[in-house]
Amino acid sequence: MELFFLFLLVVLMAFALGSGFPVAFALPGSAILTIGIAAGSGYLFAGDPAAYFAHGGAGQWLSAGVTNFRGIYWEAERDTLIAIPLFVFMGIMLQRSKIAEDLLVTMARLFGPVPGGLGISVVFVGALLAATTGIVGATVVAMGLISLPAMLRNNYSVPLATGTIAASGTLGQIIPPSIVLIILADQLASAVDQAGSLRQALYKDSTGELSMPSDFSVVSTSAGEMFLGAFLPGLVLVGLYMLFILGFALLNPKAAPAVHEEGTFTRKFAGKVVITLVPPLALIFLVLGSIIAGIATVNQAGAIGAVGAMIMAGYRLREGKKGAYSPAILAVIALLGLAMVISFIGAVNIKLITSSQDVLGLVLALIAVSLLLIAIFWSGWRTLQLENTLRGVMVETAKTTSLVFIILLGAAMLTSAFRAFGGEELVKDFLQGLPGGFWAQFLIVMLVIFILGFFLDFIEIAVVVVPIVAPILLADPSANVTAVWLGVMIGLNIQTSFLTPPFGFALFYLRGVAPAVVKTLDMYKGVIAFICLQLLALGIVGLYPQLVNYLPNRSTLLSETAPPPKNPRLQYCMERLVNEDFQQNGSSILTAIQNAESIDMSYLPEDLQEDLSEGFAKAKEAIPLMQAIKDAESQVALASGDYRPMHIQVRALERDARRIDERIEELQVIVDRSGEGGVYSPEQGERAQARIKALQEEHDALLAEIPETWEDVYGEFSQIQKAENTARLTYRRTVDQAYEPMLELNAILADAEAVAAFKPELEALKQEVPQLEPDAAVEAIAAMRSKVGSAEGTSDIREGLTEARKIMRSREPNAEAAVEEINKSLAALDADLAWRQKAASEILPQIAEYDAAIVNNIGLRQQSRLPNDMALDVAACLSDHRDISLSF
């Protein structure tokens, strides 16, 4: 019966949407009605309102939906959601102020003389508008009103003209800052948590181990990472569009003729191009650049974009009038002033003013900020007074943002009902039962999203479909895809469906503004080539995940909060790089180690000598141990060829068996609670018991299909895998032990000056102790002992102070005896300084060559962060998808 109510839920939702009922009420309404009907039917026909739910009851799932309501409402300040109204405001402001129109007209004149130049200019402007608005409908309408008449007037092919405009208008779906990407990031962040739990459970069921290695975990995402991930695929798509139009124009010049307009390339026009093009490009650079550089979060970048759009609107609305650019010039001066303050004085913090230079920096910063605020309020006043632009933009922003959030709330209730009737498990079972593994599942999901894109808006798809399918796809260790890659692929797919006849949304938008001479069939013909280009882009991004993953990884590893080299997720890629270094420079590394061993260190403390000697010995082992890792990898790769087919077969059988076990557990609850005084009737208990028996037979039959040799094959392969893991752990432990003495020596020698500074303080303490009361003397000695302990390698100096403190704390304090112990500390300090200073002048320069040779290979894990060049290589390595399924 659960399937019937699941079907009813889908039918009710489809009927409500098809009848034109508002989406915001269709989603939660269909969920509430279905849950109510299921509860009523259960009460009437089974005597239990929860009888027709997969698990739980009506109250639980209605309250879960309300909880989702409250969760989204109270968490509206999340970075991924608060950015939505900011970017919407930015896009609508640029369109209302006719900056988008200026771009189209100017670029059309600039590219006109090129074959297909008008079409190329439409794509170029579409990309710019996408990077400043992210709103598909408005972009298609704007370009249709402005560009289509110009293209038709210049004898462009109608299919090519309409296809170009429709395709370029949908670029806002994928080029950041995109509302689609923000919502996808929000949904995927929740999906990652579920996927992580699923993968952890899979690892436990497959291996029997409770904890999964952290480098096997599913990596989360954010709106900023989604923006970075979509940047290169967006450029690839724009490039494909432009190349196609150029190629089409060269092959068929009459369909896309060059447009030569006299007086185009003049000084006046050049100035117009600069004024029209530079501000939007600067705004894009500020918004996306601040995110890429890690300077601003997504919502902070959205605020920058909203303010920048308002300042640009402030001068565009008064174009041709005196003082039109005054607020913008004032804002530029203020920003340059802030940049100079930061460059020459540094970061300004009112709580950390210590010098006249800090005061000067604060004053200049206050002046610059004041000028910027004046420019912002001035521009805001202009947009409010001129054509009532600001009010209209605010109203449209409120409408669009409200639409997004209301749909989010409705989808939360719908998802709750879908799970109530076992829909999520049904989808999971269906996808995981498909032959072909992850890629078969992925293709089916993408096909479903593509078809849904004919009927549903991107918001409904993102908030209804993604939470259901994303955890399943992300949890699969065979592909081990990232959430960013999955989100970008879904975004590209939704964009493709927006172009596809007969229901493509972009086509409807364009049909609404196109003249009667443009036939709908011509529009359908025009988008076919661009749909093929979209599918080609999907294939490129699918085959080369580095296009998506590289920039987020690069940003993470180069940021101020970059993970240290000891981070488990980095080890696999780091070891590949270190192995290459060993292959190329192994002999010079060994020579550096031998040279370091020959340095005279006889005057160092014995424990330090032993540590250094052991460190050199461990360093010699690093290269052979790395070779052992590569040999173990080869053994695993060799054995996996025969092992993988059986592994896939057995894990599929075990997965199906676990699914049956879960169903048996649910039925057993009915059996246990049936009978006299129970929740369920005896008949229900008997039916459940019979079903358990049938399921148990099915379970046993599945397990009987597992090959008899499986345990032996699995055990043998596990040993080979264990040998690889042991080799890696041995290498990591060895290189850590090899480099730690170097860190210790450097720290000890670096503290030579600090140790020298202790001598006068110890002399003063020696004079004070006889004159102090025992308790006061104990405190003074303890304070000095702590200070000495702050320097590395001062245990010998502290011994005397420790004894002096004991003497003064005893029942019979003896100041003279305490002074003698302090004298011992002084003697130890003199001896300590002698070898420290000698080592600093003799050993340190010689060992620096050794350090330089091993710091980025043997000593890499001990560094605070990866060197920039290695960080880039590691980012590239992490950007590929690594199959880890054989570890499960």
Image: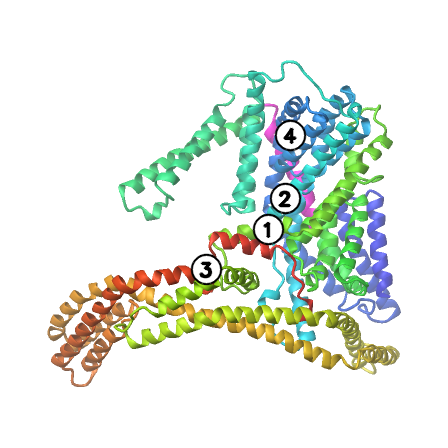
- What is the spatial separation of the Cα atoms under label 1 and label 2, in whole angstroms? 9 Å
- What is the spatial separation of the Cα atoms under label 2 and label 3, in whole angstroms? 30 Å
**Residue wearing tag 1:** 550
Instruction: Judge depth for marks 3 and 1 and give the one in front.
Output: 3
Dominant secondary structure of the residues highlighted in magenta in the image:
helix
**Residue wearing tag 3:** 856
- What is the spatial separation of the Cα atoms under label 1 and label 4, in whole angstroms? 33 Å
Looking at the image, is mark 1 or mark 2 earlier in the sequence? 2
Q: Considering only vertical position in the picture, is 247 above or below 683?
A: above
Q: Which stretch is magenta?
A: 386-408
- Per the rendering, the mark at residue 613 is none
The question of residue 259 being in magenta is answered with: no
Crowding at mark 2 (Cα within 10 Å: few <14, some 14-19, many 20+): some
Instruction: Judge depth for marks 4 and 3 and give the one in front.
Output: 3
Q: Which of 237 and 290 is in front in this view?
A: 237
- What is the spatial separation of the Cα atoms under label 3 and label 1, in whole angstroms? 22 Å
* Residue closest to the far bottom: 811
The question of residue 390 being in magenta is answered with: yes
What residue sits 86% from the left and 53% below the top? 11
**675 to the left or right of 632:** right
Are dots 1 and 2 in contact, CB under 8 Å? yes
Amino acid type indicated by mark 4? Gln
**Residue wearing tag 4:** 95
**Residue wearing tag 2:** 232
Amino acid type indicated by mark 3? Asn
Looking at the image, is mark 2 or mark 4 earlier in the sequence? 4
